[in-house]
């Protein structure tokens, strides 16, 4: 099982970035994909997730508006798009597979390697 | 949002030691807690799920316990490859939240 993310990005403020997360080694539509942000030298912050079976995204409060999760199911790939980039978006983003272990409880059992986004004019 | 308070924020120990990290949830989360390891280079791995269950392939020196609001994570017989930052996470209530992390160093 692998999640492989796209490479580092350098963007200007106000631009759009799209990060990909390609899954392999399992049936893509059986497990959701979560997105997690990690500011430089800081901890992890859950951004939300996308149901790979229905395509329905769920966003954490701080990530409603400029952020969009999407899928290309035929390619077993999930995407994170960030519109109107701001300085505070300059950080590393991780995708992770969501696996349920009872009821609505889940853990993130496999992770991508992270994608660094630099925002600079 | 459920706050996850993790301590200590950093820890220095010797090879062969046993170390313990604690995570306190601001609300009852039953056993819906996971522990993760982040090594230099950003590699993140699930170690423990549902408070005390060891993920596939994880060495038996890693363990977890607790329920409700108080949880502990233990590494027995510390190895050089255990140098990393460790995070707890509650994964049942929206939004999911992580502890602040514990950076483990070798003395």
Image (cartoon, coloured by chain):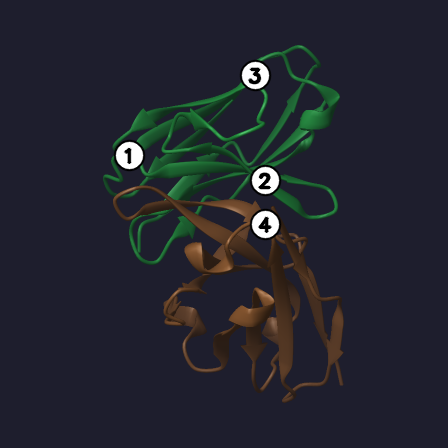
Q: Chain of mark 2?
A: B
- Between B38 and B10, the one lying in front of the other is B38
Q: Chain of mark 3?
A: B
Nearest to N terminus: mark 1 or mark 3: 3
Work out how far the residue at label 4 is from the one at label 1, CA to CA, in angstroms. 26 Å
Colour representing chain A: brown
**Residue at the image point whose x is 69% and y is 48% from the top:** B42
Work out how far the residue at label 3 is from the one at label 2, CA to CA, in angstroms. 15 Å
Percent position of residue A4, x then y:
67, 57
Nearest to N terminus: mark 3 or mark 2: 2
Residue B107 appears anywhere in the view: no
Comparing labels 1 and 3, the label whose residue is closer to the camera? 3
For residue A38, what is the image quadrant? bottom right
Kindly indicate whether the residue at mark 2 contacts the one at mark 4 (C-beta within 8 angstroms). Answer: yes
Q: Tell me whether marks 4 and 2 sit on the same chain.
A: no
- Between B10 and B67, the one lying in front of the other is B67
User: What residue would you read off at disc 2?
Assistant: B45
Kindly indicate whether the residue at mark 1 contacts the one at mark 4 (C-beta within 8 angstroms). Answer: no
User: What residue would you read off at disc 1?
Assistant: B69
Q: Chain of mark 4?
A: A
Q: Quadrant of the C terminus of chain B?
A: top right
Colour representing chain B: green
Q: Tell me whether marks 1 and 3 sit on the same chain.
A: yes
**Residue at the image point whose x is 57% and y is 26% from the top:** B58
Image: A66 above or below A50: below
User: What residue would you read off at disc 3?
Assistant: B61
Label 3 neighbour load within 10 Å: few <14, some 14-19, many 20+: few
Image: B7 above or below B41: above
User: What residue would you read off at disc 4?
Assistant: A111
């Amino acid at each position: 099982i692998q999640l492989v993310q796209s490479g580092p990005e350098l963007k200007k403020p106000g631009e759009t970035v799209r990060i990909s997360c390609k899954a392999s080694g399992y049936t893509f539509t059986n497990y959701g994909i979560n997105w997690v942000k990690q500011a430089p030298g800081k901890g992890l912050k859950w951004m939300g997730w996308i149901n790979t079976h229905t395509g329905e995204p769920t966003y954490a409060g701080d990530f409603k508006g400029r952020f969009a999760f999407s899928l290309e199911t035929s390619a077993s790939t999930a995407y994170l798009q960030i519109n109107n980039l701001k300085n505070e978006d300059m950080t590393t983003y991780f995708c992770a597979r969501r696996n349920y272990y009872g009821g609505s409880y889940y853990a993130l059992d496999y992770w991508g390697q992270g994608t660094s986004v630099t925002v600079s004019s | 949002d459920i706050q996850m308070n993790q301590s200590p924020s950093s820890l220095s120990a010797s090879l062969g030691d046993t170390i313990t990290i604690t995570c306190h949830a601001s609300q009852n989360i039953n056993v819906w807690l996971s522990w993760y390891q982040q090594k230099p280079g950003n590699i993140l791995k699930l170690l423990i799920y549902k408070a005390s269950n060891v993920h596939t392939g994880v060495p038996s020196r890693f363990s977890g316990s607790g329920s409700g609001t108080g949880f502990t994570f233990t590494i027995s017989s510390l190895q050089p490859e255990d140098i990393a930052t460790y995070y707890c996470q509650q994964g049942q209530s929206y939004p999911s939240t992580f502890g602040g992390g514990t950076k483990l160093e070798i003395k």
